[in-house]
Image: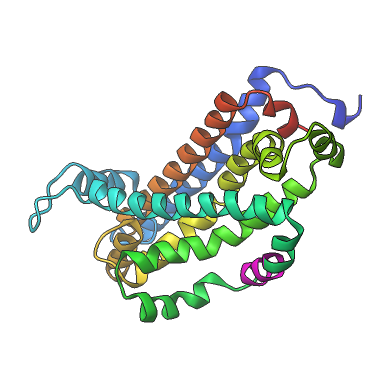
């Protein structure tokens, strides 16, 4: 039997999925044990017990100065910025993506411009954003929008262009005007892709969020990581990185479940 036709049993499939994670944990434990044996005060690869103590301190012990639970305060601040950036980007992608894809005049006007903006390195604009918009929340949200919105707009526009032309012609034959074609033909077919596009940009959105918080912020997950780095507090940094990864994974899973719930018929299309 060819390998490409191999069918895995459920236990084998589960074992293969878990294997990389188990190997990563084993490699970390081995490296940590080796370094701590040579130097019990080593901070580069702290023991799991040290990270558990740090988690308890950050998540379940009130801060002496503010009385806040720092992990949850940082999480709330970061998710508010991320939610605003993703929401604005999604709205822009839906409106401009459909407009560029369906209307030739708008495609000629905005298509090349959006393509040009998509090539600009967003992190290179961070100093400009801080100078023009200040060091507050607007500049951080703007970085997320600039970083992911152009990509999502281009993706949506291409999805519209990929729709079978026959569908639009048939709608026009039945006396549908341009706006009715958008509402009844285009929109139902591109909304599932919008959620998929948002899922694909989650990693980039978190990257821009952490970068902005690291440079100028007084709260947030990125702020905390870069605050404690000067003390080599890897027992805090590693759990924070794992928490950010967990939040991103849950957001990705939630968006996928939302797509399946709202558009169950799109499963066949995504699976192609």
In the rendered structure, the answer to whether residue 104 lies left or right of residue 191 reads: right
**On screen, residue 117 above or below 263:** below
Q: Residue at x 40, y 53 (%)?
A: 84
Query: What colour scheme was applied to this rendering of the protein?
Result: rainbow
Q: Residue at x 52, y 39 (%)?
A: 252
Could you tell me which quadrant the N terminus lies in? top right
**On screen, residue 35 above or below 263:** below
Foreground of the two, 136 or 98: 98
In the rendered structure, the answer to whether residue 53 lies left or right of residue 96 reads: left
Q: Residue at x 52, y 34 (%)?
A: 253
Q: Position of residue 261 (x, y in %)?
A: 55, 24
Part of the protein shown in magenta: 110-118
Which secondary structure type mostly characterizes the magenta part of the structure? helix
Q: Position of residue 254 (x, y in %)?
A: 49, 33
Determine if the magenta segment contains residue 131.
Answer: no
Q: Position of residue 229 (x, y in %)?
A: 32, 67
Foreground of the two, 72 or 152: 152
How many marks overall? Answer: 0
Foreground of the two, 36 or 194: 194
The residue furthest right is 1
**On screen, residue 152 above or below 20:** below
Indicate the quadrant where residue 263 lies.
Answer: top right
Q: Position of residue 166 (x, y in %)?
A: 87, 37
Could you tell me which quadrant the C terminus lies in? top right
Q: Residue at x 48, y 60 (%)?
A: 207
């Amino acid at each position: 039997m060819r390998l490409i036709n191999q069918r895995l049993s459920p236990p084998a499939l589960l074992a293969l999925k878990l294997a990389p994670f188990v190997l990563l944990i084993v490699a970390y434990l081995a490296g940590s044990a080796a370094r701590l044996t040579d130097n019990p005060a080593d901070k580069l690869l702290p023991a799991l017990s040290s990270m558990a103590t740090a988690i308890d301190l950050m998540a379940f012990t009130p801060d002496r100065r503010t009385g806040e639970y720092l992990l949850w305060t940082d999480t709330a601040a970061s998710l508010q910025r991320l939610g605003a950036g993703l929401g604005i980007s999604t709205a822009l992608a839906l409106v401009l993506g459909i407009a560029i894809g369906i209307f030739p005049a708008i495609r000629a006007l905005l298509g090349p411009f959006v393509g040009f903006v998509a090539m600009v390195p967003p992190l290179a604009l961070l100093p400009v954003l801080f100078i023009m918009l200040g060091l507050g929340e607007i500049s951080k949200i703007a970085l997320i929008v600039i970083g992911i919105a152009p990509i999502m707009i281009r993706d949506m526009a291409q999805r519209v262009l990929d729709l079978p032309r026959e569908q639009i012609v048939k709608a026009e034959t039945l006396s549908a005007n341009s706006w009715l074609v958008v509402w009844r033909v285009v929109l139902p077919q591109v909304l599932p892709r919008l959620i998929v596009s948002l899922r694909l940009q989650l990693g980039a959105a978190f990257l821009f969020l952490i970068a902005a918080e690291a440079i100028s912020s007084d709260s947030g997950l990125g702020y905390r990581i870069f605050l404690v780095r000067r003390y080599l507090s890897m027992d805090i940094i590693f759990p924070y990185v794992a928490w950010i990864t967990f939040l991103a994974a849950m957001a990705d899973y939630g968006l996928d479940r939302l797509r399946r719930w709202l558009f169950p018929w799109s499963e066949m299309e995504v699976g192609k």
